[in-house]
Amino acid sequence: MSDRSSFPDSSASASDGLVRVLPDVLASKIAAGEVVQRPASVAKELIENALDAGATEVQLLLKKAGSELVQVVDDGCGMGPADALACFGRHATSKLRAIEDLERLATLGFRGEALASIAAVAQVELRTRRVQDEVGTRVRIDGGALVEQAPCATPPGTSIAVRNLFYNVPARRHFLKTPATEFKHLVETFQTQALSCPAAGFTLVHDEFDVYRLPASDPASDAPFEAALRHRIADLFGDKDPARLVPVEETTSYLTVRGFVGRPDEARRSRGEQFVFVNGRYVKSRTLDHAVATAFGALLPEGRHPFFVLFLDVDPRHVDVNVHPTKTEIKFDDERGVYGFLKAVVKKGLAAADLALAFGPATPASAVGLAARLPDEPTVASAASAPRSFSFTGAAPPAGDGSARPPAAWPSPSEGFPEAEAADVRAGSEPSEPSPAPGAPLRASGGHVRFPSRAAMPEEADDAPVGERTIWQLHHRYILTPLASGLLVLDQQAAHERVLYERALTAMEGGMGASQQLLFPHTFAFDPADFELLKELLPDLRSLGFELEVLSGRSVLVRGVPSEVRSGDDRTVLDDLLAQYRANRDGFHLEGRENLARSLARRNAYKPGQVIRPEEARVLIDQLFACEMPYVDPAGRPTVVKISMEELDRRFSRSVR
């Protein structure tokens, strides 16, 4: 039997030359693929180490969205000369001594490969000093190779600068996203770390510009954690009024939950402002996010997501944080119990703020009174769930006003077309008006919205009448209209997206987007990532009809908006556009005008469940068949389907006589 107690070292290889042990430098570069995915990964590891070192002040310094420099400076405990060198070794950590330590982890950066992996793909300089030492230590590593270790003058604490990330792995550097995208990830990392320790001071500087300067909290406060977290949220997210945050807190022998949730009227279309920390560690958990959303219930408009910052404290023996290399995914030994408890705690907090029915058997009178004043749970066609939509320009009334009309308002499918117009079609005559450009106003004749010329219609619809036609809506999702040769079915969302998409592209290419001036210009503050993205898109946004002026301090002055945007909807439309733009870029790798046009169309198109009046549906059909490509939406989904009479006859086993 072979001896399995020993293996060859890194300098050895199998005698037949097939199996080799990788050199440490190469192994570190491969390990970097798990830990170091982008500059934000470096920032996360370094900030976690600073917090574990007891830092009360943490600075994150960036250049060129982290590709040129990611530096973290802290006032933590620092290291001596031996530890300053040893921390770059593979599997080096100060936080684990035995396997049992994994069951009682109370630190953040316990993974030993982090610094070794970072140093293998960058140029790193470490300066560190303990309080009791007269001088500090400087260590320089270039691509995993030690360049220098020497004494240096430095204040107590640690400064570690990571320059030229992936300079020696060109393929990895090539896959970095645009500076705006990488900066967004860095800001998100900074925000999560600053929230995780609200008592500490945090600073973010990008290209010599102060993005955030967050002061440390007052340790003498009566409620230090709650007060510190409330002010930290307000400092990080300028649109969050500390007085409007809803506190939640509950403690059991197994689990403690504390933190804040936002009010339902402040919910966003994106999930970007949702933070859960388990034992101080930021985690991503769809289960926990769903528990919070379920607690809000019908209070949230459809498609909106609540803001929350929640801290869960649980015995480390009941949670596994070593599920993923980045340590952002976790497992509880009682997932269902944690889900139910978190949902109940959030629901109780909302009830205490008179925002939901009280939790538990005892219902306060104030909550009962609020429930009596609340409307019934909204349906998908209610005003609460209707999107803030761009309306069509032309003869039809504005779309997306959220008004729900009974089906009786629709014409009966048995109603026929005007006989004169049907005769025109049979005779092969065409309307005299030229076909309008996509999105152009449609001319009306005799009170009826006219179709464009048959040259703009699909071949399958050549037999369609050119005047007012019988139209009805099916399940608030599809638009149906009869043809002489069968039935035409439109997907209302896909068709509307195609119209808005081509209209947006035309506006950006020609700079001709119609704008309406605001009576009182509005100034809005954006978070750093949104602010950078907005500046990047500014020329095209102006072409669409937004009149924007960039101010100092991440603020934007809005003087005008596209003519289709409803009054008071300017901030919401900008937030939604930026969120959809990022989703398209990250999910479909779309950039520039193509992305912006798709984002605008997606944000403002009719949604399934939205009631559309017949005259609005007629305009939609007109404008769809005036598009250059009316048959598919911007993502390639069909917009229209024709069901022929032959198909219907076949379905009903009817033979044609």
Image: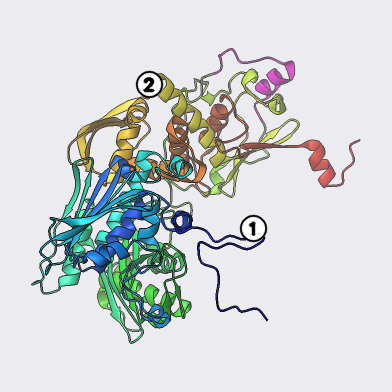
Q: Is residue 266 visible?
A: no
Residue at coordinates 39% horizontally, 45% vertically from top-left?
Answer: 579
- Circles 1, 2 touching at the beta carbon (< 8 Å): no
Viewed as shown, does residue 584 lie left or right of 467? left
The residue indicated by pointer 1 is 17
Q: Nearer the viewer, residue 131 or 213?
A: 131
The colour scheme used to paint the residues is: rainbow
Residue at coordinates 51% horizontally, 39% vertically from top-left?
Answer: 613
Is residue 423 inside the magenta stretch? yes
Q: Is residue 236 above or below residue 655?
A: below
Q: Residue furthest left?
A: 220
Q: Residue 415 at what x, y percent from top left? A: 66, 36
Label 1 crowd bin: few (<14), some (14–19), many (20+), radius 10 Å:
few
Is residue 654 inside the magenta stretch? no
Q: Residue furthest front?
A: 15
**Amino acid type of the residue that numbered disc 1 sits on in the rendered structure:** Gly
Viewed as shown, does residue 247 lie left or right of 39? left
Q: Specify the quadrant that holds the N terminus.
A: bottom right
Q: Is residue 381 above or below residue 497?
A: below
The residue indicated by pointer 2 is 511
Label 2 crowd bin: few (<14), some (14–19), many (20+), radius 10 Å:
some
Q: Specify the quadrant that holds the C terminus.
A: top right
Look at the numbered disc 2 and give the secondary structure of its residue: loop
Distance from disc 1 to disc 2, alpha carbons, whole Å, reads 65 Å
